[in-house]
Image: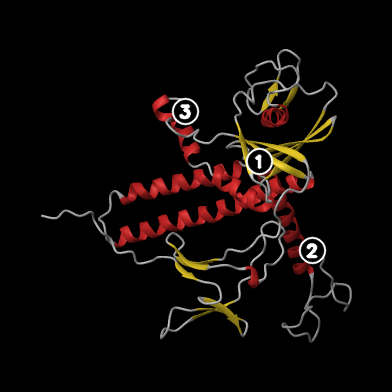
Amino acid sequence: MLVRTPWRKKNYRPLSFTKNYGWRISNGKLHLSLGKGRPRIDLPIPVVSDSATGEPVSPQLWGEIQLCWDKDARQFSLHIPYQTKRTGSVGGAVTAIDEGIINPMTLATWVDDKTIDVTIINGREARAIKRQRNKSVGKIQRKLSRCKSGSRKHRRLVAAKKKTKARAKAQLWDFNHQVSRKAAKHVIDHGTGRLVIGDVRGIEHKTRQRRSASRHQRQWLSQWERGVQEDYLEVKTGLEIEYLKESDSTKTCPACKARNRPSGRDYRCKVCSFTCHRDAVGAINILQKALHGSYMLIGPDTKIRVTYLRAVERWSPTQRSAHRKVQRRKARALSIAQNRATPVQGCKPTQANPFTSPSGPGPLAVVS
């Protein structure tokens, strides 16, 4: 008896369309050819923007196009590769990056002999997106375990699970691009020609066997999208990333080289009272090691300028609450003005200004 592995028919697979043969543009449409004797697919010409410059990319720079099916979002999407315009280094400066889960990227660059610019990009929103996705998917999965496969409820739950994963996937896609965009701006503004990143590759391997991380930390490490952000940064800057060992980079004081265990996000040296952000200390030490081969001291007069950025600029709960209060106050004032107003004699309800002031026939101006 011949034993074979289970075989499953794949209903969807990417369709590739070669340049000038599989796809072409004419009459303001993008034509995708499915072969001789088959009807072609006509689509509006998509707008493709260069991720490095933000400028539109001409179709002459497009390569092979793929039509892919997203099983979670249940929709097709076009994957269009193109030639990037920005390649090579832009200066002679060196930028070091300390990666993390809470703050995805912290960049440090020497501006002059007395100043170091540090940019910290906050990534707590990504943790919130992943936590919400994990909780929602886990809740749906528990319900699925109690359903009969193929039933109506089972199908509804599967669709809800895919919808939840598709929504989180789109949010994380935007988040990763925002992080790499802000990091690329720091690199370009400082004329960086060499990009060095602390090597944390493989940190998520064998954490359970070594018992070096808790269950929640293992989940964070396994879902860390560090590699995606690095790929986006390489495309946006045109620089090749160098990896450097970063052992004890966040514990070593850059002012006196004493070892301190930071508490929270702040670093304070017990020997020289040096204080700074924990991730900024790690980025500065990686920068010094990239320049000198080891953790070298910075001068006592060195000024560290720290810029703290959100990856995605959204309102905080306090800002949102204040905005709602203002909107409610405006709506209340508008409602009072409308109730006190009287309609103009002989004015139809469909006219633009059906209100007048109580003291005269003139129109009542309502300012929102």
Q: In front here: 259 or 169?
A: 259
Figure quadrant of residue 360 = bottom right
SS category of the residue bearing label 1:
strand
Q: Residue extending furthest top?
A: 271
Instruction: State the image coordinates of residue 261 (x, y, percent, origin top left).
Output: 62, 19
Residue 314 seen in the figure: no
The answer to whether 223 appears left or right of 322 in the picture is: left
Residue 263 seen in the figure: yes
Residue sitting at 61 percent across and 68 percent down? 62
User: Sequence order check: which comes first, mark 3 or mark 2?
Assistant: 3
Hey, what amino acid is under mark 2?
Answer: Ser
Question: Which label belongs to residue 368?
Answer: 2
Instruction: State the image coordinates of residue 87 (x, y, percent, origin top left).
Output: 70, 54
User: Sequence order check: which comes first, mark 1 or mark 3?
Assistant: 1
Hey, what amino acid is under mark 1?
Answer: Asn
Real-space CA distance between mark 1 and mark 3, rounded to the nearest whole angstrom = 22 Å
The answer to whether 148 appears left or right of 51 in the picture is: left
The answer to whether 104 appears left or right of 147 in the picture is: right
Q: Residue at label 3?
A: 213
Hey, what amino acid is under mark 3?
Answer: Ala
SS category of the residue bearing label 3:
loop
Figure quadrant of residue 101 = top right
Q: How crowded is mark 3: few (under 14 residues within 10 Å), some or many (20 or more)?
A: some
Question: Which label belongs to residue 143?
Answer: none
Question: Which label belongs to residue 122?
Answer: 1
Q: In front here: 246 or 131?
A: 246
